Image (tube, grey):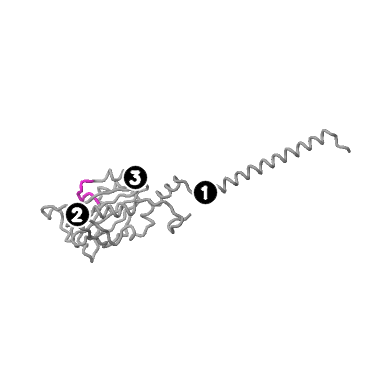
Amino acid sequence: MNEVPGQRRLAWMTLIMASTLALACAAVAAVTAGAAVTELTRGPTRTELDRAAAAETAGRWRSWPAGRIFPETVGYAAEQGGRERAHRVGISPETRCERAVDPGLRETLRRTGCRGVLRATYIDALQGVVVTVGVVAFAGEREAVRAKAALPRTGRPSPGLLALGFPGTVTDRFTAVGRQGGLVRQAGPYVVMTTVGQVDGRPGKAVGEQRPTIFAFTGDIADRILAGLATPELPSCESGEWRC
């Protein structure tokens, strides 16, 4: 049976349309593949780098070794002038927020989003003053700022960070009643609290005339620990700490 001219034209038109559609699909696939390759091979944007740095900083309290957060020695300005170094006595394995502060502050930390508290105790170069440093971790800077604003900043030791003494060391008499001062600092997603006293454990009311300058070095220690922990670092594929 012979094919009529109209049927022949319809077949050709169908073939042409199918070919055109196939070419269009191939072109779209090529563009999509090219865009995917570009997305996979491009470098990170500044916004992505900042987000990664912020996430890494907020996770340091979990990912860093305790000895990195609390160095074995920390430099400070001595009361008599010059530079001295405080020595770390010990680090607490306890990280629960409610175990690190007086009962009057537990609800404040819970409400502001405390994720954990790391504590370590240092002794000054003359081995007469003991300071416990507490690093309070939050999800982000906003939460940490809220917490600092809600915490007491009078310099009084209570309510505040609990003293951390270690049996068998010169700090074993440093208890809650022996606390004589405290401070609060904040940077990034962290708040640092300190509480300070003397190695003989005497309470503040038994000291007589106060000499606040003997405790001034605790601010140096808090600031140095806080700066090391809270300073963001942009991702680097050359560093073993980042996975690219």
Measured Cα–Cα span from mark 3 to mark 1: 33 Å
Quadrant location of the N terminus in the rendered image: top right
The region drawn magenta spans: 153-160
Is most of the magenta stretch helix, strand or loop? loop
Amino acid of disc 3: Glu
Label 3: how many residues lie within 10 Å, few (<14), some (14-19) or many (20+)?
A: many
Label 1: how many residues lie within 10 Å, few (<14), some (14-19) or many (20+)?
A: few
For discs 2 and 3, the disc positioned in front in the rendered view? 2
Mark 2 or mark 1, earlier in chain: 1
Residue 39 in the image: state x and y as whole percent.
54, 47
Residue 37 in the image: state x and y as whole percent.
57, 48
Name, please, the residue furthest toward the top: 6
Q: Looking at the picture, tell me which residue is in the foreground, 131 or 125.
A: 125
Question: Is residue 62 toward the left or the right of residue 13 in the image?
Answer: left
Residue 121 in the image: state x and y as whole percent.
26, 59
Residue 42 is tagged as 1
Residue denoted by label 2? 215
